[in-house]
Amino acid sequence: MSTLLAEYSGFSEPASSPLLLLGQGRDLASERGVECIGELPAPSDPDLVDRARAARAALGSRAFVLGHHYQRDEVIDFADVTGDSFKLAREAAARPEAEFILFCGVHFMAESADILTSDDQQVVLPDLAAGCSMADMAAIGQVEEAWAVLQDVGIADSTIPVTYMNSSAAIKAFTGRHGGTVCTSSNAEVALRWAFDQVGGIDGTGKVLFLPDQHLGRNTAVLELAMSLDECVVFDPRKPNGGLTDQELRDARMILWRGHCSVHGRFSAQNVADIRAALPGVNVMVHPECKHEVVTAADYVGSTEYIIKKLDAAEPGSSWAIGTELNLVRRVAKAHPDKNVHYLDSTVCFCSTMNRIDLPHLVWAMESLVEGRMVNRIVVDADDAHWARVALDQMLALPGI
């Protein structure tokens, strides 16, 4: 652990690592490689905060600004509501009077907001390059080819697709067309139980095709549904037949897509062992997108909202090591100076695409709207929007939502 940050009691800042200079040019090796078009204010502009305040005031109730938990503090400062992806999409839908929804998150989140809001509302993503590496690991063409494999093997009729919220509108639509549902990290267990009930129950022979995060699917099936690791197989879209034999597909109960979160996938069981050695008695809490060996080594596992609430309720003086995105860990550490909060990894692990939305992009988007110019509007194809809404409505109908 490196130097203690003075403003965060008990919080050790991880060592820095090279990051893309955001808002300038293109990163052709990134998930989306989309350049943001427009004259962006300089990050060094001393009037940037005042410009943001002025633009926000000028937009007034015409605009509703959403900020995901993983956003930078400079962006969160201007958010009307903060939360996880699904909470923010629902908040957008609950504001029909807002003409503009400025979604400070990533592309799939803005798509969900467009699906759930009215046709009169316009969703804006301040930087089109704010994608999601996990969502991009499941292209619709690949998923349709995978479904054809399941049909050839003779198991498609007994398979229900379940897609994580962190997926494109096209994948949500595929799920809706095939009788499946969407899930979040908070309700994955409920969603999987519902899916298995559609094909004979957990004790039967039916299957779930889980997209696009293999780790959330595996962790939920094994730890919450008491399935074995042997009942989980990974479908690799880059390999013939997904890299699996027909018999392996027939024997499987959970067919997991070969996808993962680039942030949560970095954490290791060694990180857990190291922090326990350095801080005896520390509570280790991680997101269920982490690898199975990390989740089983942790003390607590839960969604972003779960992590926040757990820290809120924790005893003063308690020690916590958290395995999730660094902006969130910094923020909860600052909010709880009476607790010792540490980052689970020893190096920086920002969500690089989420971090593309910085204050210059937000100012540019808001000032453009003030001047009557629509920029970076996210519009989902009507047919995809219909079927994605079917899958989302199925999730909303699940118990406990």
Image: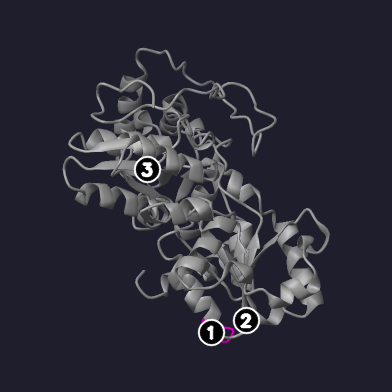
Q: Mark 1 points at which residue?
A: 201
- In front here: 237 or 321? 321
Q: In which quarter of the image is residue 334?
A: top left
Q: Residues within 10 Å of mark 2 (few under 14, many from 20)?
A: many
Q: Can residue 382 be seen in this view?
A: no
Are discs 2 and 1 less than 8 Å apart at CB? yes
Which residue is at 57% across, 44% downward? 132
| x 59%, y 48%: residue | 134
- What type is the residue that disc 3 sits on? Ile
**In terms of secondary structure, where does tag 2 sit?**
loop
Question: Relative to 362, is 210 above or below?
Answer: below
The residue wearing badge 2 is: 206
Along the polypeptide, which appears first: circle 2 or circle 3?
A: 2
Question: Overall secondary structure of the magenta stretch?
Answer: loop
Gap between marks 2 and 3 measured at Cα: 36 Å
Left or right, 375 with reference to 70: right
